Image: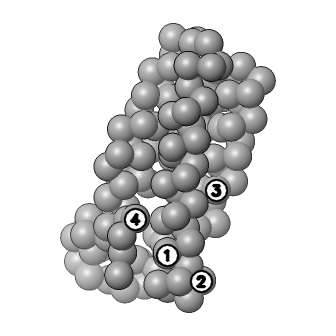
Amino acid sequence: MALHYNLAKVYAISENDTDFVMDIVTLFVVDVPQDLLEMKNAIKEKEHQKAYSYAHKIKPTLDLLGMTVAHEEIIFIEDWSRKEGKKREIIETYKSIENRIEKAVKEIRKDFNI
């Protein structure tokens, strides 16, 4: 049972195509953690444009998987990146996103035997 993600949008746009759903969740499990790590490194190195690029890349997936709070937080990181804010301002937001994504990945791996 999904506690950390919601596939309603995925099923809706795919018209309940289970192969498509599997492709989306596999893509999430494989790509998003790596993109998240790249974003973390960009934040650490104050590479605002790179951090923005990774946040922007991750954002639609979070929306698609019904991860509303993480989606709102990633928008906050995009805004921070555009304003070239100070690193300490964004650390807690990043940690929250990382935690939410880790929980969703773990749950998806279990739910879909990935």
Q: Nearer the viewer, residue 30 or 37?
A: 37
Q: Which mark is residue 4?
A: 4
Q: Is 52 drawn above or below residue 37 in the view shown?
A: above
User: How far, Cα to Cα, is label 2 from label 1?
Assistant: 7 Å
User: How far, Cα to Cα, is label 2 from label 4?
Assistant: 16 Å
| First-in-chain label (4 vs 1) | 4
Percent x, y for residue 73? 42, 37
User: How far, Cα to Cα, is label 3 from label 1?
Assistant: 13 Å
Percent x, y for residue 111? 47, 84
User: How far, Cα to Cα, is label 3 from label 2?
Assistant: 14 Å
Q: Which mark is residue 114?
A: 2
Whether residue 62 can be seen here: yes
Residue receiving disc 3: 33
Q: Is 25 drawn above or below residue 22 in the view shown?
A: above
| First-in-chain label (3 vs 2) | 3
Residue receiving disc 1: 108
In the rendered image, which quarter contains the N terminus?
bottom left
Amino acid type at circle 3 is Pro
What secondary structure is found at the residue carrying circle 2? loop
